[in-house]
Image (cartoon, helix red, strand yellow):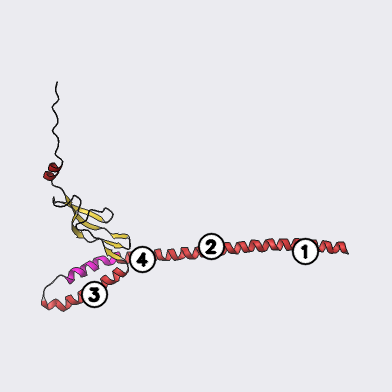
Amino acid sequence: MFAEQQVIIQSLKQELEVNKKRISELQDSMRRLAADFENYKKWSAKERQTIERAAAESLIKKLLDIYESLGKAACGTKDTRANDFIDGIKMIYKEFSRILKTEGLEPIPSVGLPLDVYKHEVVMQKVNDEVPEDTVVEEIQKGYLLNTLVLRAAKVIVSQKSKISENIQNPEKPEEEKGG
């Protein structure tokens, strides 16, 4: 009878070890699943932010022309009969500006600054010896940043040195005559 009990005890010990191992495996599996789920939640939140940013970018791009037209209309007329209308447009433009700014929209500074090929699109060059070459001298169309992303590059005219100025600054050395 003692031998039978020893066999039963041994069998129970083996079963206990198997169950302990199984519990350990299940706990590891649960930890991995919990970590995977946390990673998924983080990824999902990032993905949602990316989609929201892309949607905002797309919407703001579509609204830029309307926004600029409102700005031009607000500054456009001196007709006293239209003052109330213009005041209304100015209020709309001001509110529109506030909303776009809270969404992260900022105009790209241009005039008087050196050309930045990431933020400026050169549409023309103009001879101007009063400023360094490749300085933005005029803005044709405003550019905008959405947070740090260039939403639309500013279309600009940049300075170019005149040929006379270039010759004064960098005079060509005459070639020396070769003797024979």
Q: Are marks 4 and 1 in contact (CB under 8 Å)?
A: no
Q: Are marks 4 and 3 in contact (CB under 8 Å)?
A: no
Q: Callout 2, which amino acid?
A: Asp
Q: Is residue 23 left or right of residue 107?
A: right
**Distance from Cα at disc 4 to Cα at disc 3:** 23 Å
Mark toward the start of the polypeptide (3 vs 1) = 1
Mark toward the start of the polypeptide (4 vs 2) = 2
Q: Position of residue 42 (x, y in %)?
A: 47, 64
Q: Are marks 3 and 2 in contact (CB under 8 Å)?
A: no
**Regarding mark 4 in the picture, which secondary structure is present there?**
helix
Quadrant hosting residue 173? top left
Q: Which mark is residue 12?
A: 1
**Distance from Cα at disc 3 to Cα at disc 2:** 48 Å
Judged by depth in the image, the label closer to the viewer, 3 or 1, is 1
**Distance from Cα at disc 4 to Cα at disc 2:** 28 Å
* Residue denoted by label 4: 55
**Regarding mark 2 in the picture, which secondary structure is present there?**
helix
Q: Position of residue 48 (x, y in %)?
A: 42, 66
Q: Which mark is residue 36?
A: 2
* Residue denoted by label 3: 92
Mark toward the start of the polypeptide (3 vs 2) = 2
For the record, the magenta segment spans 61-75
Decide which of 4, 81 is in the foreground and name it: 4
**Up/down of 164 relative to 112, above or below:** above
**Residue at 18% over, 68% down:** 72
**Residue at 12% over, 45% down:** 165
